[in-house]
Image: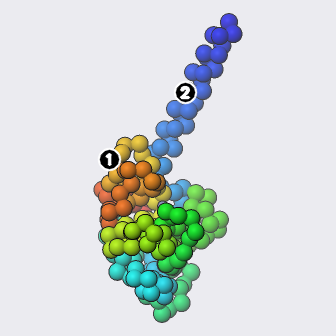
């Protein structure tokens, strides 16, 4: 009798895990909220040119533009003061090794799963790019496109389908499926952007 009830409890737990896993998986690669607008500009801190990332940040803007009619990313260079909806791009330093970039969302709660955000502050950590032999055009483009994807509301591609993950610019981690030579959104990434913003 005791043994039997244990089996029932196990199957109830299994069922509830399955039931909650389905909706989570469907939204796993986008954040719960999004920017106030997908039409915005990027302001370049002087470190972008100083560290040699201007071409790659320009590239990243262009690669996310034209997929959804609601998303268009321009530039105000580095001479104008950023407006409240302008993204800010910096090339900086981070002591955590293999940490190539980070995007901070600024809105009501600064958490892209809790509220919409107005703009993002994006960093690429050049010291780690250099340390890992990634301070080349291809890898810089990869990280710039990845981080700007976060600004647009895309989270990490964590689908168990390794093909999707190995082709996605939004993949993250240190396993062999993460390809830092990808310099543009995959079809899957484009689909996620459209899911977020519309066609
Ligand atoms: Zn990331």
Q: Secondary structure at mark 1?
A: helix
Residue 19 drawn at (x, y percent)? 53, 33
Question: Which mark's residue is nearer the viewer, 2 or 1?
Answer: 1
Q: Which residue is mark 2?
A: 15
Residue toward you, 45 or 87: 45
Residue positioned 52% across, 67% down in the render: 102
CB-based contact (under 8 Å), mark 2 and mark 1: no
Q: Which residue of the protein is positioned furthest toward the bottom in this rendering? A: 79
Task: Give the residue drawn at x 30%, y 56%.
Answer: 187
Quarter of the N terminus within the rendering: top right
Which residue lies most toward the right here?
A: 2
Furthest-top residue in this view: 1
Mark yes or no: residue 188 visible: no
**Apparent side of residue 54 relative to residue 101 in the rendered image (left or right):** left
Image coordinates for residue 127, horizontal then vertical, percent:
49, 73
Q: How is the image coloured?
A: rainbow
Q: Which residue position is annotated with label 1?
A: 163
Real-space Cα separation, disc 2 to disc 1, in angstroms? 28 Å
Q: Nearer the viewer, residue 70 or 150?
A: 150
Q: Is residue 13 visible?
A: yes
Residue at 53% x, 68% y is 103
Q: Which mark is residue 30?
A: none
Number of residues whose C-alpha sits closer than 10 Å to that of mark 1, classed few (under 14), some (14–19) or many (20 or more)? few
Above or below 48: residue 127: above
Left or right of 27? Residue 54 is: left
Above or below residue 193? Residue 3 is above
Determine whether 102 is above or below 2 in the image. Answer: below
Marked residue nearer the N-terminal end (2 or 1): 2
- x, y percent for residue 17: 56, 32
- Residue 194 lies left or right of residue 117; in this view the side is left
């Amino acid at each position: 009798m005791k043994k039997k009830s244990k089996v029932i409890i196990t199957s109830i737990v299994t069922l509830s895990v399955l039931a909650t896993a389905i909706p989570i998986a469907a939204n796993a690669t986008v954040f719960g909220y999004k920017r106030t607008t997908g039409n915005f500009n990027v302001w370049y801190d002087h470190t972008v040119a100083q560290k040699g990332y201007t071409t790659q940040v320009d590239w990243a803007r262009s690669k996310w533009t034209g997929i959804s009619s609601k998303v268009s990313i321009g530039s105000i260079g580095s001479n104008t003061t950023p407006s409240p909806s302008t993204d800010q791009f910096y090339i900086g330093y981070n002591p955590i090794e293999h940490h190539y970039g980070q995007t901070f969302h600024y809105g009501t709660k600064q958490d892209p799963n809790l509220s919409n955000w107005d703009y993002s502050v994006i960093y690429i950590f050049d010291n780690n790019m250099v340390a890992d032999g990634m301070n080349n055009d291809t890898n810089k483009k990869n990280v710039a496109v990845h981080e700007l994807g976060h600004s647009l509301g895309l989270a990490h591609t964590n689908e168990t389908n390794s093909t999707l993950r190995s082709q996605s610019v939004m993949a993250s981690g240190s396993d062999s499926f993460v390809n830092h030579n990808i310099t543009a959104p995959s079809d899957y990434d484009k689909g996620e952007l459209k899911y977020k913003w519309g066609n």
